[in-house]
Image (cartoon, rainbow, N blue to C red):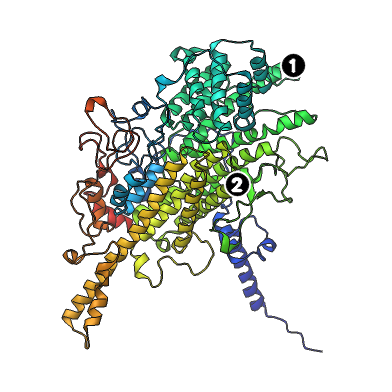
Amino acid sequence: PAQRIVPSRKTVDRLQTQVDHYDSVVSRLFPGRDLATLVSLPREELINLALTTPAAATSPSSGSEPIQQEPQGTQKSDGADSLEALEQAPDQDPITDEAKRHRDKVQGISDDVNGLSLSVDRQSSYVGVSSITAALKVIFKTAPVARPFIVQSYTETALPSRSNTPPPQTVRTDPNFLPSADVGHKIIEAYFSQVHVLMPMIDEDQFWHTYLYGERRDSPWLALLNVVLALGSVAGVPGDNEEHIKYFQRARKHLDLETFGSGNLLVVQALGLMGGYYLHWLSRPNEANSLMGATLRMATALGLHREYTDGRSQSATTEMQDIANSRRRTWWTLCILDTWAFMTTGRPSLGRTGAAVTVQSPKIPEQMNNAQYLASLRLLPIIHNVSFCKLATKIQDKLAYQSLLKPDELFSLDAELVRWHEELPPILRAMPEKPSPKQRNTPNPHGRPKSVTPSSATASIRNPFDFSQPPDRDSTACPEVLKTPRAIMHWWYMTLRMLMHRPYLLAVALRRTPFASMSAEEKVAVGKCRIIAGDTIRDIQAMVREEVISGWCSVWLMYQAVMVPLVSLFSYLSSPAAYTHSGSPGKAATDATTGGDEDVDKWRAQVEIAIKHLDSMQRFCHTAKKTRDVVQMLYDASKHVRQYQEAFYAQQQLLHRRQHQEQSPPQGFGAGDVASSMDVYSMPGGVTNTQLSYGAPPSVPSAQLGHSAWGPSPNGDTAMGSFWDDMMWDTIPEMADPGAGGALAPGLEQFDWVPGVGGGGQGGEQNWADWAFGEQQGRLGERLR
């Protein structure tokens, strides 16, 4: 028999140390994961899992802790300082704002809150680091040559903004007028089947009873009825439907300033639906924000934020329990709508939740018959959105006063979000099919894949009731009424995770830091942001339903997600590394998505998916066309930046060779070589003979902007301070001020942005010295390096 070899103690210790090291590395990369489940995963899935798995939270904050905490002398990094420079105080008397914009048109499209007006120099309202405007400022800061390109192309791609919208005075506004019985019935059915499940404030049975029997004609009831008719008209009739405006105008006839002193719950519900949802459809976010703030104060005055013992005691009657549940649904619906609206603006919540808010989540009966079971299914979204609202409010408030969260805090909050999603019942946990790596970033030519939920998923013990009882009920199949709310919940969850990490992406883009030079924490945050944004784009495209509510939300959140690959593209294409390496810029050696700079081709594919999605949603959402135009222009501008930079670096190499040849002329230099070296002059966006001065890039047409030519490289460190001081890109008033004597350009509507027209640099101009790249440029440059 073979002799048995006994390893020495030293060998055993060495092997044990290696195993311990491997275990330590795996536990840090994949906390809480079983090693056996990782062995069979391909390399791409392992990389994605490592980047998207949140770090183990050592002390997750309790949901019962007070949300509002005053910062105690928070120390700010260079990245946080540069991000705060993205914020801007609004003009005291802006040339254009929502009130002027909607004076002659009820429904417009361009607004500076959501970045559709492409106005970054002058703001009529405040937005923070979570906004689209912050991302646009970083793009134009990182790649200044993109801005004149968009200026020249904008008038060709912009579409007149809702020119067929009737002026307010032409709409019939008899406050007591109601549609015919069959028309009204159809519109109300559309509201309760498509809108109500997202915001179930209204008691559906009581509402139908009052409407069918015609028992009430008072203002609170007619205000609520007309708001329901407006939203039902929006949801039930896709396309350029203007019927909803008539109901909106009639509802406003029953609501005035004295209404805010009302103690009627129907008034609170009417104002909540109008300010929390409908006004956003009209692209009036500031008006919606103000109205929702007043509505929450009204709800507080009615005591909706408190839980009372009479509604939860054992002796409470069915009527008392119904009233208590109606109050709970109303309060939490207002909070959820306010959370969704604030999430993408970077504004503080001003106390939406906290220790003083004791009202419980809506309740559903533990023992139910089939009718009660089906009705209770419709309450699942709001029940689970309550916990999401609390967590999102905490994150929003932190980002509002601290633009760049500390890495440990960021990863801990991300872990809480992931835990919330994992604890959703299977019926609400949306899990789109993941395409193979080669198909991951290409749209499906045969249509959108269906959303599936793994059968192995099980509900958490925190779920309100057990879906496995009774046995004949499927606990994983999603009913039709919940498919749109489930998709929207998933999109908001992904969007919030992306917005948490996006400040790190903006900060490194402003510092022009390549991925390889980032710190370990920055690599994780930036990599997560990019991967989550890519997954969000894919999930929206895969899960959207062909209906107004789903399509509208998909357009809104697709616009948020696509800003990440766009910022990444401009940041990478403006860096020398994109043109000094051999091969195609950004060409990855593998199909694996890593979140690094080598994913540049995947970023382009994601932008193209977003553009195609926005194109397909135009018949369901009136802002899809304008949103698509903005994304397309930014994408075209990225191509222009690449051509511009390629020409610039080719010129630099040519001049360097000429200087070298003048010092030591090579042997055999012929005419063919000269002709080959001069090909740069014929490149798109190339240079001319008059531009051959070493260190100077090809000049950018600046006559339309009224600026002088830029100095050395517009993307170089020396230009970062002077560029923002010199650049003023104003927007024409979206409502021409008759007193100013202004006139719109021929063929343009009053809502369209026109370059080079506006205030002539008087008042309201942002002080770009706040970017900290002016007099302190040298010192800051040393800090950033």
For residue 568, which numbered disc appears in the image?
A: none
> Amino acid under label 2?
Met
For residue 317, which numbered disc appears in the image?
A: 1
In this view, the residue in front, 71 or 692, is 692
- Estimate the x, y position of residue 131 in percent, counting from the top left: 42, 41
Query: Which quarter of the rendered picture does the N terminus lie within?
Result: bottom right
Residue 153 in view: yes
- Estimate the x, y position of residue 591 in percent, counting from the top left: 53, 65
Q: Residue at x 49, y 18 (%)?
A: 250
In this view, the residue in front, 15 or 482, is 482
Tell me the residue that label 2 is attached to. Answer: 543
What's the CA distance linking mark 2 and mark 1?
A: 42 Å
Query: Which quarter of the rendered picture does the C terminus lie within?
Result: bottom left
Q: Residue at x 77, y 29 (%)?
A: 371
Q: Is residue 180 above or below residue 663?
A: above
- Estimate the x, y position of residue 605 in percent, counting from the top left: 48, 58
> Amino acid under label 1?
Thr
